[in-house]
Image: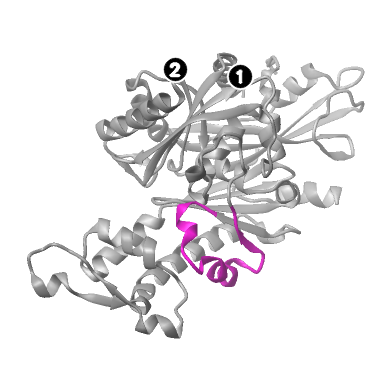
């Protein structure tokens, strides 16, 4: 665990150094769009109407925002490096121009890499007196790193629970007395090549990486409210190339996964089913799409505008019912896959089974009703928290990961990694340990 300990500390200190400069960029590299926000950290950030309390605590203001069409990204991973580099450079330069500052450090997130969750545990005897930072460092060092497999890297490794003797649900054990100190950790591993390719593109743009996070974690950070994070909830981030799944409990992420399908697959189905260009299919999906047909939809005709030179082909039309018949099967497939992965993770054992949908693809009309029938009754559509200075165009569900990355960068939940490690296992995709913590405390 020592190598992991020092790696997490190095990333945390690099982020702290970037934040001390006062300006840092947030970069969300998605399949459909690449978004960049420039943050300025201030002494006192005023809270206006509708601004969440987390935004006030994080003490930053958005001073630049730009979105560009992603190029070279497929299923949340780099597919063509030169095109991805140009998209990142375009987004960052646009945000810098709007903010009228130059940024050297970015905090990035991505949705690919086939994430795998590992619940881990460790315990040590307290030497003498109350629990101190040295004891916390010892218990974290005692956790055995699992065999995550070749070609895999650790993206997140966060302590999610501490216990001393019979007390099993301590947020912070420092200063408390006892004999045995225990720690539970959630570790998230991803494919190493997914990280390396993204880092190469960022470095080619003359930028330094100050932090890296998974998109499902970032999206849930901004879309879930405090009670949902505390009592247990799942966030399904429906993007263009992937659908991210994350489960939070007691304000910590305890599970994450991704499905390699999203809104781009719906667009592809429309394009192939109606034999129209992808751009036209995206426009029709955005303007007329839905998943629930009504009697009126049989009479609503949608013109399939094209420019092929064929008079009959260019003047075709379909009803909205036919369009919904193409969209709904793919959306059902994504939601059913998400349901299967939540069940495999043990989400059904949680007392609170609230599910929040966010992401650009979650804006399809009628999706909340369809999701309630497939995922359960406690489903709502989530929007990101309001942060100071965020443009109106960036306040929709499509920017949940971007806003969440702002919160994660400004208020990282990894302060335990700032302790000095000393030289002193279970794996799987289950929430049984997390459920036990919850039942012991509630």
Q: Which residues are magenta?
A: 358-382
Percent across and percent down for residue 383 are: 58, 51
* Residue at the image point whose x is 58% and y is 19% from the top: 19
Q: Secondary structure at mark 2?
A: loop
Q: Quadrant of residue 158?
A: top right
* 31 left or right, relative to 346: left
Percent across and percent down for residue 76 are: 39, 43
Q: Is residue 89 visible?
A: yes
Between 394 and 349, which is closer to the camera in this rendering? 394
User: The N terminus is located in which quarter?
Assistant: top right
Callout in the foreground (2, 1): 2
* 292 left or right, relative to 196: right
* Residue at the image point whose x is 25% and y is 57% from the top: 278
* 245 left or right, relative to 334: right
Q: Which residue is mark 2?
A: 104
Q: Is residue 427 visible?
A: no
* Residue at the image point whose x is 32% and y is 64% from the top: 284
Q: Residues within 10 Å of mark 1 (few under 14, many from 20)?
A: some
Percent across and percent down for residue 5 are: 62, 22
Q: Which residue is mark 1?
A: 9
Gap in Å between the C-alphas at discs 2 and 1?
A: 20 Å
Percent across and percent down for residue 171 are: 80, 35
Q: Secondary structure at mark 1?
A: helix
Of pointers 2 and 1, the one earlier in the residue sequence: 1
**Is residue 380 covered in magenta?**
yes
Q: Residue furthest left?
A: 309
* Residue at the image point whose x is 46% and y is 63% from the top: 364
Q: Quadrant of residue 343?
A: bottom right
Q: Quadrant of residue 150?
A: top left
Report the colour scheme: one colour
Between 409 and 98, which is closer to the camera in this rendering? 98
Q: Residues within 10 Å of mark 2 (few under 14, many from 20)?
A: some
């Amino acid at each position: 665990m020592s190598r992991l300990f020092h790696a997490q500390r190095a990333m945390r200190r690099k982020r702290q150094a970037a934040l001390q400069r006062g300006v840092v960029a947030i970069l969300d590299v998605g399949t459909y769009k690449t978004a960049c926000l420039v943050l300025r950290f201030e002494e006192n950030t005023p809270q206006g109407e509708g601004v969440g309390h987390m935004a006030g605590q994080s003490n930053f203001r958005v001073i630049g925002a730009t979105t560009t069409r992603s190029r070279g990204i497929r299923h949340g991973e780099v597919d063509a490096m030169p095109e991805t580099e140009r998209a990142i450079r375009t987004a960052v330069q646009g945000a810098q121009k709007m903010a009228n500052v130059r940024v050297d450090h970015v905090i990035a997130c991505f949705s690919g890499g086939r994430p795998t969750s590992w619940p881990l545990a460790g315990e040590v005897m307290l030497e003498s007196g109350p629990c101190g930072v040295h004891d916390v460092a010892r218990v974290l060092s005692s956790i055995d790193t699992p065999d995550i497999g070749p070609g895999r890297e650790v993206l997140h490794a966060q302590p999610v629970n501490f216990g001393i003797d019979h007390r099993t649900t301590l947020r912070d054990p420092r200063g408390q007395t006892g004999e045995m100190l225990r720690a539970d950790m959630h570790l998230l591993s991803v494919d190493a090549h997914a990280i390396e390719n993204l880092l190469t593109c960022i470095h080619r743009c003359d930028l330094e990486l100050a932090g890296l996070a998974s998109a499902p974690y970032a999206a849930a950070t901004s879309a879930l409210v405090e009670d949902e994070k505390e009592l247990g909830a799942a966030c399904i981030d429906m993007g263009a190339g992937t659908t991210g799944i994350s489960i939070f409990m007691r304000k910590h992420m305890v599970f994450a996964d991704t499905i390699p399908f999203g809104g781009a697959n719906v667009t592809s189905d429309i394009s192939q089913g109606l034999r129209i260009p992808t751009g036209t299919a995206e426009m029709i999906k955005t303007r007329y799409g839905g998943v629930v047909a009504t009697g009126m939809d049989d009479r609503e005709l949608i013109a399939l505008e094209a420019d092929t030179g064929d008079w009959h082909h260019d003047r075709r039309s379909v009803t909205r019912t036919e369009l919904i018949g193409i969209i709904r099967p793919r959306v059902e497939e994504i939601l059913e896959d998400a349901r299967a992965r939540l069940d495999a993770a043990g989400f059904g054992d949680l007392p609170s089974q609230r599910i929040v949908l966010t992401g650009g693809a979650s804006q399809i009309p009628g999706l909340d009703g369809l999701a309630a029938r497939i995922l359960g009754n406690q489903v709502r559509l989530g929007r990101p928290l309001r942060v100071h200075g965020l443009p109106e165009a960036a306040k929709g569900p499509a920017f949940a990961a971007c806003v969440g990355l702002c919160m994660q960068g400004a208020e990282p939940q990894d302060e335990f990694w700032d302790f000095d490690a000393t030289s002193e296992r279970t794996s799987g995709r289950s929430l049984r340990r997390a459920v036990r913590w919850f039942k012991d405390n509630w």
